[in-house]
Amino acid sequence: MQEWEGFYFSVDEKRQTVRVNIFGEEYPVTAPAKADYIHHLADYVDKKMREVTARTQSKQPARIAVLAALNIAHELFSERREKELKLSSVEGKAEELLVWMDQKLAEDLELPQPRKS
């Protein structure tokens, strides 16, 4: 089971149908997720559609939905890119640390040996 912002989703969970309201229209959504999670997603989509409506002159629900979907896709891709950059940075730092540790171990092995009498 995965947690996302306090909501739970599981591919093992029994599929259920939940009715949600997005942009004044009611839709049945069937998914293997808790009802609260599905409502949370629907509220987010509704919010994004209302943001598009406030910024554009369009009154066409299909156009508004497409623009909202593009905005959500942009958010997703931006988050993915940020995650990739952070992961790349961590991997780079880990590699630097490994090189440093290898150097220190090599230095320790090069310590002068005690003289034999």
Image: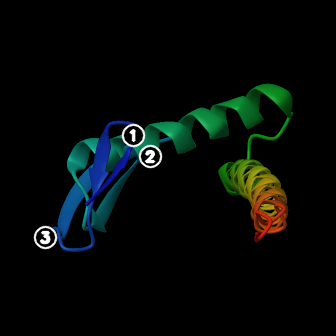
Q: Amino acid at mark 1?
A: His
Query: Residue 15: where, in percent of width, then height?
Result: 18, 70
Element class at badge 3: loop
Q: Amino acid at mark 3?
A: Lys
Report how far apart the C-alphas of labels 3 and 2 lie in the structure.
18 Å
Q: Is residue 92 left or right of residue 12?
A: right
Marks 1 & 2, CB-CB < 8 Å contact: yes
In the displayed structure, would residue 71 be above or below residue 107? above
Residue 30: name its quadrant. Answer: bottom left
Way the structure is coloured: rainbow
Element class at badge 2: helix
Query: Residue 51: where, in percent of width, then height?
Result: 71, 30
Residue identifier under label 2:
41
Residue at (77, 55) in percent of width and height? 97
Disc sitting over residue 50 in the figure: none
Residue at (74, 58) in percent of width and height? 94
Q: Quadrant of the N terminus?
A: bottom left
In the displayed structure, would residue 102 be above or below residue 66? below
User: In terms of depth relative to the viewer, which is nearer, 55 or 37?
Assistant: 37
Residue identifier under label 3:
14
Residue identifier under label 1:
40
Does label 3 or label 2 sit earlier along the sequence?
3
Query: Residue 63: where, in percent of width, then height?
Result: 76, 54
